[in-house]
Image (cartoon, rainbow, N blue to C red):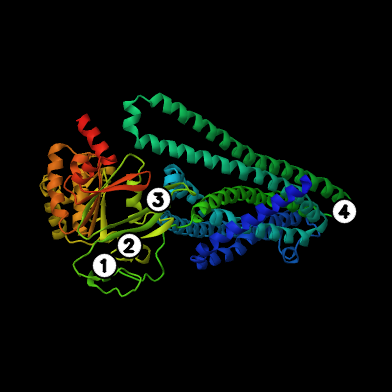
Amino acid sequence: MSNTKLKTNAKSRIRANDWRLFLRLLPYARRSQRLLLFSMLLLVPVAVANALPPLLIGQAISLVRNEPGTYEFLRHLSLLQGLHLLEGLLLITVIIQLVVTGFQGFLVQKVGQHLTAAIRQDLFEHVTSLGVRFFDTTPVGRLITRLTSDVEGLGDVFSTGAIGIVADLFTLLVIAGFMFSIQWKLALLLLLMLFPVTALIIYFQQQYRKANYKSRDELSVLNSQLQENVTGINVVQLFRREKFNAELFRSSNNRYIQEVDNTIFFDSAVSATLEWISLIAIAGVLWVGGFLLLQKNLTFGILSAFVLYAQRLFDPLRQFAEKFTTIQAGFTAIERISEIFDEPIEIRDRSNPRFSMFDSRLGFIDDPAMNSESQTAKSAWGEIRFEHVWFAYKDDDYVIKDLNFTIHPGEKVALVGPTGAGKSTIIRLLCRLYEPSKGRILVDGIDIREVSQAELRRYMAVILQEGFLFAGDVKSNITLGDGYTFDKIQQAAERTNIAQFIEELPQGYDTQLRERGTNISSGQKQLLAFARAAIRDPQILVLDEATASLDVGTEALVQKALNELLVERTAIIIAHRLSTIRNVDRIFVLKRGELIEQGSHEELLSQGGLYATLHNLQMLGS
C-alpha cells in the first residue's frame, strides 16, 4: 500500500475516532438539553447582530454620497434624519450583540460545568470500582491527572468548543448571505479564500492534537513524581535524596515544557496564518473592488461594507480556530479518560445474587451443591473452604497452586511462610479483591461469587499492618460512613481499649485527624483499626501482621482486645513472628503458593520441616 493511502486511512481513522469520542459526551449533554437548545436558539440574534454593522456603515456612506445603492426608505429622509436612524440601528445591534452574547456565553459555560461535574462523578465511581489489579499497575499521579486537568478540558469541548464552533459557522453563513445579497463577485472572492485557510487550520490542529497528547502524558509523569515524593518524604529526607529527586523532577519538567512549547507553536501558527490571510483578503477586496468602482459597477458604500465584511469574515474563523484548538485538547482529554472508562470492572456482583451470608446464619440455604456440614448448626458460622484454588497475577505465572483446605467455624488459623509464599494473596482472594484463576472459595458453604461484595465484606473484617486513616473526625474513622449510633461507637472503643485515649483528645470523638492520621501515633492508629473491626461484629477476622508495628505497651492493649474479638469467631492470622501464633488451633505453612505443612505448633516442630527450620532460625536470632 502506498504512503498516500496509509496517510489517508490514518486520517479517516482519526476522524472516525473523534466522532466516537464526541458521541461519548452526548448522554451527558442530554442531561442539560433544555439549556443547550435555548443557547443554540440565541445564536440567531447574535449572528444577525454581528452581520448588520458593516451593512449599516456602508448605507451611511452611500447616504452621505447620495449613491444609487442607498435603501429606498433612507432616501425619503433628510441626511441628518437618515444618519440618526442608522446610528440608532447600529447602537441597537451592538447592544443586542453584547447582551445576548454574554447571556449565551453564561448558559453554555453552565452546561459545560454540569457536564464536567457529571463526568468527574462517574469517573470517580468507576475508578473506585476497579479491581486491585488495576491499581497495582497504574501510578496514582496518572489517575489524579485524569480526574482533574483532563476532566476540566471536557467542559470546554461542549461549552467553548462545540457550541462555539456552531456559532461561528452560523455567523459565517449569515455574513456570506448578506455579502451575496449585496455583491456576489466580491462575496465569491472572499469565500474562495476560505478553502486554503481551512486546509492550513486543519493541518495545524492535527499537529497540535499530537503535541497536546504528549504534553498531558508528561504532566501525568510530573504528578506521579510529586505524589511519590510527598508520600515517601520520610525516606527522601532520611536518605538525603532531595537533590537526586529534584534532578529527576527537573528532567521531567523540562520534557513537559518542551511538549507544551510545541502546542504553543502550532496554536500560534494558526493565529499568524489567519492574520496574514485576512490582510490578503482585505487587499483583494480593495483591488477587485477598486476595479469594479472604476467601471462604475460598485459604489463606495458597498466597497466600504465589503472591507468591513472581510474583517468580520475572518473574526469567526479566527475564533473557530481557537475553539478548534480547545476541542482538540478536549478530544485528547476524552481519549485519555476513555482509557479509564474502558478499563473493565474485574470484580462484579451477579445481577441477582443467589445467596445471603445472613441466610447461611439462619440455615435457609437449600442447594444440593452445598456441603451439608455448613447447615448442621445455626450457630456454626464462619467456615472457610478453598477448593482447588489456583491464581496468577498475570498469564500462567501462578502464585497460588491447587490450594485445598477447610477452616472450621470458630477456628484460629495462622499462615506462615517465607516472603512471596502467597499469604497476602490468600487474604485478597478470600476478600474477593481478586478472582481465582481456577477453583472456588466458599464461606459457610456459599461460593463467594454468589454473594454481593458489600455483604461479604460486612461478614468479615481485615486489619492490616498499618491502619489507614482518612482526614476527618475520630467517629467517622471508626464508622467509615456506616450509620452506627454513638453508643455503638463508644462500645467498640471500650472493647478495643482505645476509649481512654479518645476521651483524652481535645474534642474527644469529634477531634479532627489529619490526612493519614499524622497527628496521632502508629499504635493509636492501629487501635482505631481494631475499633473499626469491633463495631462491625464480623464473623471472620483476618489479621495481616496487625501487631507488628506496635510497641510493647500498646501491643499488650491490642492483645487484650484481640482475645475478646476472637471469641466465637473464625480467624486467619498472618504472622512473621512465630512466637505470636503458638496458641492458634492450626498453622498453615506455605511455600511458593503451595500448602506444604499444617498442624499445631508442637506438631510442626516435631515434623522437622520448613516450620521447624523457620522457628529455629528466629529463636537463634533472638
Give percent across and percent down for residue 558.
15, 46
Left or right position of 92 against 313: left
In space, the residues marked 2 and 1 are separated at their CA atoms by: 10 Å
Residue 244, position as x, y percentages in the image: 42, 25
- Please name the amino acid that badge 4 sits on: Lys
Q: Amino acid at mark 3?
A: Lys
Query: Contact (CB < 8 A) between labels 3 and 2?
Result: no
Residue bearing mark 2: 442
Q: Residue at x 38, y 57 (%)?
A: 388
**SS class, disc 4:** loop
Q: Earlier in the sequence, mark 3 or mark 1?
A: 1
Question: Is 16 above or below relative to 546?
Answer: below
Q: Callout 1, which amino acid?
A: Ser
Q: Nearer the viewer, mark 3 or mark 2?
A: 3
Residue 519 in view, yes or no: no
Residue occupied by mark 3: 401
Hey, what amino acid is under mark 2?
A: Leu
- Circles 2, 1 touching at the beta carbon (< 8 Å): yes
Q: Which residue is mark 1?
A: 374
